[in-house]
Amino acid sequence: MKAKTIITICAGVITLFTACDDSLNIPQHGVLNYETYYQTDEQAETASTALYIQLRGLEYNYMVGKNMLGDDFWAGGAQRNDNAELEQLNEFTFGTEQSMLQGMFTSYYQIIYKANVALGHVVGDSKVMQRVRAEARVFRAWSYFELISMWGNPPLVDHELTPSEYSLPNGTTEELWALVETDLTEAINSGSLPEKANADDQSVWRVTKQFAQAVLGKAYLWQKKYSEAATVLDAVISSGKYRLYDGNYEDIQMYDHKMNCESILETIKVDDANNIWTNMNMATLMEHWRTDHMNIPAEYAANGYGFLNPQKSLYDDFVSEEGESGYRLGQTMKTLQQMGDLGISIKVGQTLYGHEGYFMWKWRKLAAQIPAAGYGFCDNNNTRWMRYAEVLLLAAEAHLEAGNTAKAAEYLNAVRVRAQLPPKTSITLNDIIIEKRLELCGEAVRFQDMTRWGIAATRMATQGQRCPSIDSNGNITYTVYNQSADGYGFKTGKHELLPYPGTEIRLNPNITQNPGW
């Protein structure tokens, strides 16, 4: 009897736990099962959307951080150490723990991961799915172009990794560039990437075939494959899908001229009063003038932080090429006197730190582009990732190096004529170097160009030695903050490549750190 009772009790307990197990065995909500998801076009679109969202998340570190690494700007801000991270980049005093470099490096690999998810799981044959896979290849290749051109030989990740693959070593130069070329070539030849109907078509906001060709042209140029670069960049130009913006030059980057004929890729921001925080953009807030130290007419946004102020060397290059009254110069930046003529001045008793009296004008921020009063972190402007002028200058360099000087001059002069400058009958690489600095200043391409051309050490050897400030009377003083010559400036044999972030090295001991770090 006792045995029977025990058996009965045990059976009841087993039944109880079995019932509990059945009750708890329910699908997990909010988690995608990649083996069963991405089966429809709608689901495939989510893989594509994730890529565009991730690109937008890179805006701040990309635009602000990369501009800090060049010789166009001072870090700026309210005073010394207002943003030490920017000062580190600008003065080359950073190390392996630099947070903005960590953010950039991580963001590129997050794009690569999302691209690998799309390529590994969106496998259907519908037009939408084919386009999603082509987009993923372009995003992956673009991310690797950025990683290779700034870090050298990062790990190659061309699929979703299993746990045993988490500690990959550095890739080789050959295999990394091969992946970039293969991804872009397959995407271009797939017939799945959209194209604009013409240069004035504003309906196509996705990655286009021509954007993929432009990135491939850059990749070839960086590898000194000049003929290949010239051919693919020519294809973008001859497509007729883009042209140089033919309005006022100062409006190219403005919020009310989004998606213009020159823009090859933009991050799209929708004017939606009910969802203004989707348009949060710290980059434009940082780049706008230091408005609390200035008298600003009501038409301009009064919420700028005053970082990324033009260096005198940039102004001087403009003057050398265009003269003090140059059309493009006056619509790109303005002097303190020119700002005063517009009713904009430094408040009496205030100074602007990291400033030599030059103000960026082509990315000025207007009050009208802020979607709601008091929300200065948000604005309705799009981020421009590439525009047609860059393609022309890349093609000019490719043709020059390939020996076709006439074609190189044609493309360079197209940019010069728009800038209201006389065309050059013969050109040199230095002409392209200067033109590219003037045309694309503040567009996050300078650092990679300078290291590729081998001019960074000369141009930035003493950057960070001292920092300027200007008062309301226009008096400029320079203060030395970094005393040791070893502690500032671009160093040959070190700064040509950025350091792999310390966290990456600690997590993955198989990564070999770059020289000098």
Image (tube, rainbow, N blue to C red):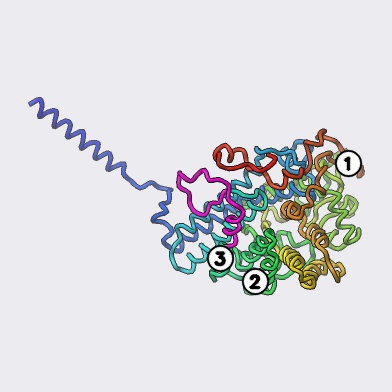
Quadrant where the N terminus lies?
A: top left
At label 2, which amino acid type do we have? Asp
Please name the residue that numbered disc 3 is placed on. Answer: 187
User: Which mark is first along the chain, 2 or 3?
Assistant: 3
At label 3, which amino acid type do we have? Ala
At label 1, which amino acid type do we have? Asp
Which of the 4 image quarters holds residue 504?
top right
Quadrant where the C terminus lies?
A: top right
Graded by Cα atoms within 10 Å as few (under 14), some (14 to 19) or many (20 or more), the crowding at tag 3 reads many
- 290 in the magenta segment: no
Please name the residue that numbered disc 1 is placed on. Answer: 471
Is 341 or 471 nearer to us in this picture? 471
Which of the 4 image quarters holds residue 267?
bottom right
Give x and y (percent) for residue 190.
53, 69
Number of the front mark, 3 or 2:
3
Give x and y (percent) for residue 514.
66, 43
Picture mark count: 3
